[in-house]
Image: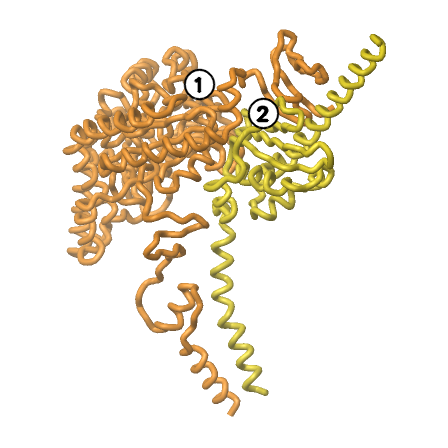
Amino acid sequence: MTSKLLAALLRRSLLKPTTSSCYSTTFIHRRPLSTAAAIVEPLEEDANGITMKGVKISGRPLYLDVQATSPVDPRVLDAMLPYYVSRYGNPHSRTHLYGWESENAVESGRAQVAALINASPKEIIFTSGATESNNISIKGVMHFYKDKKRHVITTQTEHKCVLDSCRHLQQEGFDVTYLPVKPDGLIDLEKLRESIRPDTGLISVMMVNNEIGVIQPMEEIGKICKEFNVPLHTDAAQALGKIPIDVDKMNISLMSLSGHKIYGPKGIGALYVRRRPRIRVEPQMNGGGQERGLRSGTVPTPLVVGFGAACELAMREMEYDDKRIKALQERLLDGIREKIDGVVVNGSTERRYAGNLNLSFAYVEGESLLMGLKEVAVSSGSACTSASLEPSYVLRALGVEEDMAHTSIRYGIGRFTTEEEIDRAAELTVKQVEKLREMSPLYEMVKEGIDIKKVAHFGYGVVAGRIQLDQSGRSSSGHLSSRESNLCLIRLC
Amino acid sequence: MLRHASKMILGQGLRFPSTRAVTVGAGTPRMYHERVVDHYSNPRNVGSFDKNDPNVGTGLVGAPACGDVMKLQIRVDEENGKIVDACFKTVGWGSAIASSSVATEWVKGKQMEEVLSIKNTEIAKHLSLPPVKLHCSMLAEDAIKAAVKDYESKRAKSNASEEAASVEKAADA
């Protein structure tokens, strides 16, 4: 009798309509037996706009963050879909049609990727992304040659996965040289030459930097590596499909590639491993010996097909995209520079990929600028985005001064960016920078003629009124101690 | 009684999913509290007073190297020591701007001694600042104290110079 009661109560309460605004509970109550997939939508969308994480905007933001990831080209998606729903075989199944057609698709994808970098398809292995490829290259090569080679050379502006792999090697006892870069972001070839030792096993230099977009002189670096017979690894995730790459001309032994930066699917990447002269690598993923034994695991056919299609499209449209993106970059830069001053481009302006524009705005802080630019999806090189109080290590390696390093914004321009988006982004940026400069005491001080570089730190008890700097560095009111002769440092005693 | 008990149990079970979903959203570190966004988009009391005005105290705190610099100015009524007006200028994170904006709102109409007791924890709580941004509220508290100290030192100086002037007059006479 009690069980009947409980059952009745359960039935009644489960089928009661709820007024809860939480999506998941209404879902559970309305369709308990639905086979529809779970929908993950924590944002509230209504006729007035979108609210998410406390911010309300009138629609989806303009996407100017192509270096982080890119939208999948619809043509790539078309190529991928049959391999999800009808030709879904495992390419390593040797016994039936599903496996054979899947394997064919993987091989043609491999050929498309190889064609873009002037390599042979036998030299391409597929991985889960450029991070995995970087790990295999750096750790795999050094572990293989660990008896004879104990030294790695890389730069200070590499991607985090390269730097972290090198740090892992350092913990294992290898030596790593982190080459500094010049203020324009390019490495000094003389310093590279000097740091090569007889036991150098690998040199790793990224082709196009993800933060500042500078293009390293790969051909010259390749020549030096050939001279000293050291393998060259490059992280070409941002370079693939955007600048012409030729592994023979650049003498590259290992190259990491990524799918989702060239309008392909996420979760796929590739590693180019040279066969003549052969470079040996210790695999990081053990298993059934797929991908020439270097990377075990089922090769994801739809992702490979997508990656291949994206590479083929990139080969066809590289020149056209490049022209268009250069024009858009100029439009953005001019649009911003016309209205405000104190705009600095970080990194070399000549050897630069046009789709990456990293700007610093003086007297304004990056995170507050981003907070006001919620209608434009951009990224910043400043502290807050890295969840620490330090500015980006790439900007610091460039020698950008601390106060400018906090203010940088990276605009990414891609294949699908339109002129209207660029104009609107420029307009919004100018408006926000002007508003923040009005609120900025540093801008005010500069306007009044005070050199803020001379003021390192402000503390309690600032002089009554103006901060006066005289020859001795003491403030004019005279009641403070100054630490150094050219600093007006006001400290609480 | 059994019915009531089972209703209670079932009621509890069904209430859980909704509360869980709400807390998940609020815990993410990159969310700005509405108040911070509000103070950033509509900052109160941005501006400058004349620094040489004897009734104005200026507090300037922070370091350009850290990315946060705050300038808070208060105008004090001479007779009763009450703060009649305040304004600020800040360069820094959104939460730094919001903290200084809140600080100017809170000091208006208060006595100088009273505002010295404003704690950064109160500002942080008002804005629901996550731990990584607590130093912005610290800076706002420092700015208030610096402004008050500055005003007092100005007063002390002007009193001293007045005394000196009157002594001189007495000496001349």
In depth, the one of B19 and B36 nearer the eye is B36
Q: Quick check: A6 above or below A302?
A: below
Measure the C-alpha gap from mark 2 to mark 1.
47 Å
Residue visible at 19% across and 31% down? A321
Q: Quick check: A333 above or below A63?
A: above
In depth, the one of B139 and A107 nearer the eye is B139
With A85 as the anchor, is A203 left or right in this view?
right
In depth, the one of A318 and B153 nearer the eye is B153
Q: Which chain carries label 1?
A: A
Numbered circle sitting on residue A180: 1
Q: Picture coordinates of residue B19 (x, y %)? A: 51, 63
Mark 2 lies on a secondary structure that is loop
Residue visible at 21% across and 40% down? A310
Q: Kindly indicate which chain is depicted in yellow in the rendered structure.
A: B
In depth, the one of A54 and A382 nearer the eye is A54
Rendered shade, chain A: orange
With B19 as the anchor, is A233 left or right in this view?
left
- Three-letter amino acid code at the position of disc 1: Pro
Residue visible at 69% across and 39% down? B115
User: What crowding class fits label 1: few (fewer than 14 Cα within 10 Å), some (14-19), or many (20 or more)?
Assistant: some
With A457 as the anchor, is A121 left or right in this view?
left
Numbered circle sitting on residue A457: none
